[in-house]
Amino acid sequence: MVEWNPGLNNEAHTLRAAYQQMPREGAPAIPWYVKLFENPASPFALPGAAGVFAHDCIHILLGRGTLPQDEAFVVGFTMGASGDLTLLQRRFFVLFASLVYRGSYRFSRIERRIFNIAVNLAIRIASSVSVGSPA
């Protein structure tokens, strides 16, 4: 995994410019165990699953890079923001990502903590925003 961070303070960047600069492996390089629960086309997709393009755009919008901790944050945030993630699904995913995921995809103690922080943050943000009212 290549270290890259779009930052949040770069006014010269558009989403398109940041996306074009982002290092990507492409969908075929993503392992099956990641696609199993994180790909919206999978029958086993968990709440918050996003396609590769959407996932990459979320990285940029959240100002997160491509380190394992950034991946854990992005996945946790999207799952938490879905409004549909159950505690059982959350615990199962963390266990699966800690035991089955390999290499830079595997959740260490740090990634598990960051994932849970991101889920909680997204849930708190979603609960503080009223549906239908202007921000």
Image: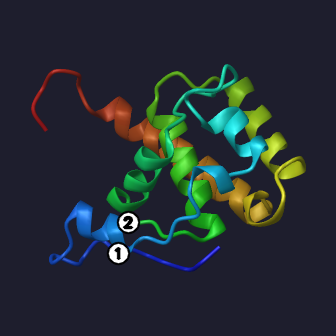
Image position, residue 3 (x, y; %): 56, 80
Q: Amino acid at mark 2?
A: Gly
Disc 1 target residue:
7
Residue drawn at (37%, 74%) of the image:
21
Q: How many marks?
A: 2
Q: Residues within 10 Å of mark 2 (few under 14, many from 20)?
A: some
Image disc number at residue 19? none
Q: Earlier in the sequence, mark 2 or mark 1?
A: 1
- Residue 23's place in the image compared with 37, above or below, is below
Q: Is residue 133 left or right of residue 35?
A: left
Q: Which quarter of the figure has residue 66? A: bottom right
Estimate the spatial distance between the alpha carbons at disc 2 and disc 1, rounded to whole Å.
5 Å
7 with respect to 88 (left or right): left
Which quarter of the rendered picture does the N terminus lie within? bottom right
Q: Position of residue 48 (x, y in %)?
A: 51, 33
Q: Nearer the viewer, residue 125 or 10?
A: 10
Residue at image point 19% right, 66% down? 14
The C terminus sits in image quarter = top left
Which residue was labeled with disc 2?
63
